[in-house]
Image (tube, helix red, strand yellow):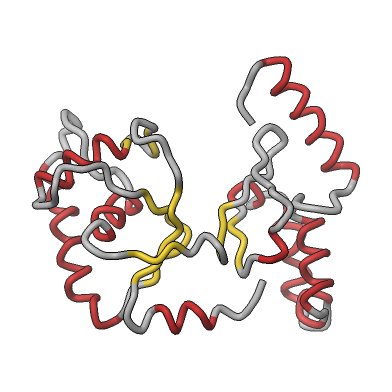
Amino acid sequence: MDKLDFIDKLAQNQLGGILLDYDPVRRVNGLSQAQASHLHSKLGLPLQVPDYYGGEIYVLPSALLPEISGYAESAWQYTLEQSDGKNPCFYTEEHIMNFVLAHFSVVDLKRSIRRVWTTHRHRTVTGDESNLSLWHLPAEKGRGFRKTFPFALDTESWFWQTERQDFVRRSASIMGIDHRCLSRWIPDQLGNLANVFLGAKQ
């Protein structure tokens, strides 16, 4: 939602990522942080549960790229050696990047960038999204972004011509964050009811 100048400044000498507060035994794409700790220890890190950073964004200083590349390569080679599927390994690039980040001090970018879920039964909207610089909206690939695409192609549309406040308001409505239209609001309310009756966690 804003110019990301702070990322350029950060990248001069620090790494950045979005720290996620996951249960250590929760599996993300097949691997939990508890399992990852054992993989990390096999590759030279202390045996401890590492922090988990989402794959939305990684800020990597150019001066550290050779070192970062080396850690990523070692994780990739280990994964290839475990390709028979008998033992846990790094299943996604996010797993590999978390191994890389475990070697460094990482600045949490959560105050500026956040993953926001907008499905009918899983919403993580908190109400302060307008203060963020960037939204990651995984559930909007086939809905909000599709509706926004024609405006993004038109350089005379609100997407390019409006001020920040109106841009955020329009985008939030289309993406189901705030000022939702009835076609989004009603299914969202039904999703809440389903969660209540089925005992699902919000």
- Residue 26 as seen in the image, left or right of residue 153: left
Q: Identify the residue at the far right of this view.
A: 182
Q: Locate the C terminus by quadrant.
A: top right
Image position, residue 32 (x, y; %): 32, 36
Q: Which residue is drawn at 67% across and 15% down?
A: 198
Image position, residue 135 (x, y; %): 62, 61
Quarter of the image where one finds residue 22:
top left
Q: Which residue is drawn at 48% across and 59% down?
A: 56
- Residue 183 as seen in the image, left or right of residue 131: right
- Indicate whether 95 appears above or below 135: above
Quarter of the image where one finds residue 119:
top right
- Indicate whether 18 appears above or below 92: below
Image position, residue 69 (x, y; %): 20, 68
Image position, residue 158 (x, y; %): 83, 75
The count of marks equals 0
Q: Residue at x 24, y 35 (%)?
A: 35
Q: Nearer the viewer, residue 118 or 157?
A: 118
Q: Locate the N terminus by quadrant.
A: bottom right
- Residue 180 as seen in the image, left or right of residue 197: right
- Indicate whether 155 appears above or below 194: below
Q: Which residue is drawn at 81% across and 56% down?
A: 173
Q: Which of 99 and 148 is in front in this view?
A: 99
- Indicate whether 5 appears above or below 75: below
Q: Nearer the viewer, residue 23 or 188?
A: 23
